[in-house]
Image (cartoon, rainbow, N blue to C red):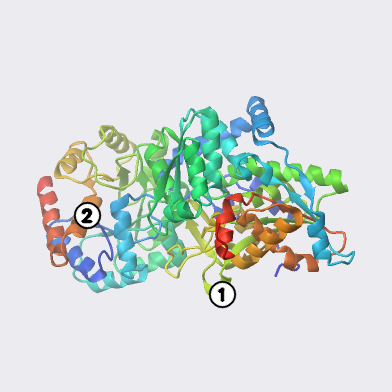
């Protein structure tokens, strides 16, 4: 499925200067498809981010909090037993490393972005924060930083997701956030995002919207990526220390695509590094019940960005299906659509069952229970490992911990807790 | 200018309501194409879109209905659609089909100035006006650019928020109308939250050329019994019309 893709890109296509361009586009993807009411706020946000990155006091505060509050840097861990497992008692096969984002405060990569955007909101003088959440990880991360800085926090969450992720709902409430159930449409992440945007349209002057993925209107895909790029930057340095060069393959799960983009970003121009994003195939892409946007979607517009999209023949957005609430989204970040189009990144999809198997395997071999989202990336090792050369080095973004998913997994495996 | 959602509860009723609104003095009609994720709409129009989609409404069927009404419907029809149904069909193809059934204008609430240029050219070639929106948060210099780029009229969003009924108009609408008139000579229609006769009188006093009544009409149509929807829409339109004479 991923083999060697035809490389359609020129070096200039990979330049950070055009990812995105001045109009907020990654090739034809991206842009700002939102009501006019929000445009001035998006312009203000882009400007504020630009000034912040150029301000050493912002950078030092962010770095200080990433270290002392989030717990960065996260380790690059050599998964020896997982490596052995895929070598199948031979000495041949790739070596597998985990970038341990699951060890961050709140248990996933999401807090890198939530923290950065909260600092931006404070710079912009906005005291009310809203966010959408699917699995609840971004909601928890946002509620956490709002508590840390004394900001009012409202989280929009689909009613169906609130049922699937009751533990995270309670965590958010414990942190002082108000969680608003969204019942419109399919009552999942896409509808929660629409409702968050409607709130922002109404309260834009007092409120900052901490969007949780590399999706949405410009500047969000760039902004969220840049706050997560610390994942890839640390990985680059840690690989150099561990084995003296960059890895051969980067592997990450993709729903909206923030953990993948954070890992990929510092490596995009280094063509020796293969980048693979793994989507959720749900019950199987052939069943129509899946969330494999890049592998199955068509170009469209959702939540402010042009990107690939799961939609019907009339352009109505289709419901996505995945056992993992965090991947259950019919859209995908525009930069992923671009990297796929130019052939710089590869994308594959694995089913619910494959992800559940991988979750058990990693738990039992490494003593690490990965999130269901993350388990999709692990599951792809089955197909990937046999195709790789000996001495290949793979880095998987271990984007989140699986504690939140224990009930779902138990239900799926027929156990009662 | 009344707004209604095509296909709520079904397209046969929509066709009758369009003619009834025309008979009761509507100057033009804004017709919504239902979309699954209407970001700029409040609950009333969201629900109307859901009902219309459940009834199987699609852009193609809306075009077919309009083509069947072509001889009877003489006032301008402005289509209100989100970007995705447009992109899905292709901008050229959408404008071509719209123009063939006599559509005069297009309002795309999630297509701001920066994204509008390409569509505006394509629409103009098919003699369709792409109407752009100005919001209370729009800075003055940007307002001028939007008014200069907009065709047909400029749609002034009267509230910082989504569509829906409101009991009173925000006081700054008057100065927004004035500002917009100063920016360009293009007509101005005020929408979002215009739900009563007194709102229409107020925006006319402030100098607007038109007012768009959406959620209030959509709600009346929704609440009326099956046999009364057409009549209810007509009588509400007549009431609003009388206020402007």
Q: Nearer the viewer, residue B19 or A4?
A: A4
- In this rendering, would B28 be left or right of A282? left
Q: Is residue A328 above or below residue B212?
A: below
Q: CA distance from mark 1 to mark 2?
A: 41 Å
Determine the image quadrant of residue A152: top left
Residue B53 x %, y %: 34, 66
- In this rendering, would A298 be left or right of A65? left
Q: Is residue A197 above or below residue B80?
A: above
Q: Nearer the viewer, residue B244 or A411?
A: A411
Residue A100 x %, y %: 71, 46
Residue A174 x %, y %: 49, 37
Determine the image quadrant of residue A206: top left
Residue B198 x %, y %: 15, 41
Q: Which mark is residue B219?
A: 2
Q: Which mark is residue A286?
A: 1
Q: Nearer the viewer, residue B141 or A66?
A: A66
Is the residue under label 2 in contact with that under label 1 (CB below 8 Å)?
no
- In this rendering, would B16 be left or right of A206? left
Question: How many numbered discs, if any?
Answer: 2
- In this rendering, would B98 be left or right of A237? left
SS class, disc 2: helix
Name the residue located 42 percent from the left edge and 53 percent from the top edge: A159
Q: Mark 2 falls within which chain? A: B
Name the residue located 82 percent from the left edge and 47 percent from the top edge: A239
SS class, disc 1: helix
Residue A343 seen in the current view: no
> Callout 1: few (<14), some (14-19), or many (20+) C-alpha neighbours within 10 Å?
few
Question: Comparing marks 1 and 2, which lies closer to the viewer?
Answer: 1
Name the residue located 21 percent from the left edge and 68 percent from the top edge: B13
Q: Is residue A54 above or below residue A198?
A: above
Residue B185 seen in the current view: yes
């Amino acid at each position: 499925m991923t083999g060697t893709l035809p490389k359609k890109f020129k070096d200039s296509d990979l330049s950070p200067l055009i990812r995105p361009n001045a109009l907020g586009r990654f090739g034809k993807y991206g842009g700002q498809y939102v009501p006019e009411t929000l445009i001035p706020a998006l312009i203000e946000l882009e400007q504020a981010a630009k000034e912040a990155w150029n301000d050493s006091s912002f950078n030092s505060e962010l770095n200080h909090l990433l270290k002392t509050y989030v717990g960065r840097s996260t380790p690059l861990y050599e998964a020896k037993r997982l490596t052995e497992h895929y070598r199948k008692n031979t000495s041949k096969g790739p070596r597998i490393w985990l970038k341990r984002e699951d060890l961050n405060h709140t248990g996933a990569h999401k807090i890198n972005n939530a923290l950065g955007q909260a600092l931006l909101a404070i710079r912009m003088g906005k005291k009310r924060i809203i966010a959408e959440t699917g699995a609840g990880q971004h909601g928890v991360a946002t509620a956490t930083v709002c508590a840390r800085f004394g900001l009012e926090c409202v989280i929009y969450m689909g009613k169906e997701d609130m049922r699937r992720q009751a533990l995270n709902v309670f965590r958010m409430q414990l942190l002082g956030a108000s969680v608003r159930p969204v019942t419109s449409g399919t009552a999942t992440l896409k509808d929660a995002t629409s409702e968050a945007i409607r709130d922002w349209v109404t309260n834009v002057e007092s409120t900052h919207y901490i969007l949780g993925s590399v999706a949405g209107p410009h500047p969000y895909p760039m902004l969220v990526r840049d706050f997560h790029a610390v994942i890839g930057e640390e990985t680059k340095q840690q690989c150099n220390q561990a084995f003296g060069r960059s890895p051969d393959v980067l592997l990450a799960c993709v729903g909206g695509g923030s953990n993948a983009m954070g890992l990929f970003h510092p490596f995009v121009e280094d063509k020796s590094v293969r980048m693979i994003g793994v989507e959720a195939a749900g019950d199987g892409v052939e069943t129509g019940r899946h969330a494999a946007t890049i592998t199955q979607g068509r170009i469209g517009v959702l939540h402010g960005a042009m990107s690939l999209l799961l939609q019907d023949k009339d352009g109505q957005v289709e419901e996505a299906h995945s056992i993992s609430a965090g991947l259950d989204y019919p859209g995908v970040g525009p930069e992923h659509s671009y990297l796929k189009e130019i052939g710089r990144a590869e994308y594959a999809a694995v089913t619910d069952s494959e992800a559940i198997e991988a979750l058990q395997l990693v738990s039992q071999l490494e003593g690490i229970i990965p999130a269901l989202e993350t388990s999709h990336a692990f599951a792809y090792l089955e197909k990937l490992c046999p195709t790789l050369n000996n001495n290949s080095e793979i880095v998987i973004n271990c984007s989140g911990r699986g504690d939140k998913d224990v009930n779902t997994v138990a239900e799926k495996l027929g156990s009662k807790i | 200018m009344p707004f209604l959602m095509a296909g709520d509860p079904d397209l046969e009723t929509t066709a009758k309501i369009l003619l009834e609104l025309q008979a009761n003095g509507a100057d033009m009609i804004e017709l919504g194409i239902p979309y699954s994720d209407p970001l700029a709409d409040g609950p009333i129009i969201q629900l109307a879109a859901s009902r219309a989609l459940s009834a199987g409404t699609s852009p193609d069927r809306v075009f077919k209905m309009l083509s069947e009404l072509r001889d009877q419907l003489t006032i301008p029809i402005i289509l209100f659609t989100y970007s995705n149904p447009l992109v899905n069909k292709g901008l050229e193809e959408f404008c071509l089909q719209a123009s063939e059934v006599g559509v005069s204008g297009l309002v795309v609430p999630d297509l701001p100035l920066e994204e509008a240029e390409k569509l505006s050219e394509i629409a103009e070639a098919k003699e369709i006006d792409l109407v752009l929106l100005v919001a209370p948060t729009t800075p003055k210099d940007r307002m001028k650019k939007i008014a200069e780029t907009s065709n047909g009229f400029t749609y002034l969003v009267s509230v910082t928020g989504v569509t829906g009924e409101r009991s009173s108009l925000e006081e700054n609408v008057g100065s927004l109308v004035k500002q917009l008139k100063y920016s360009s000579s293009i007509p101005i229609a005020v929408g979002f939250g215009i739900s009563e006769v007194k709102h229409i009188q107020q925006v006319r006093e402030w100098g607007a050329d038109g007012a768009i009544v959406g959620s209030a009409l959509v709600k009346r149509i929704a609440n009326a019994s099956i046999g009364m929807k057409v009549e209810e829409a007509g009588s509400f339109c007549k009431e609003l019309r009388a206020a402007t004479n």
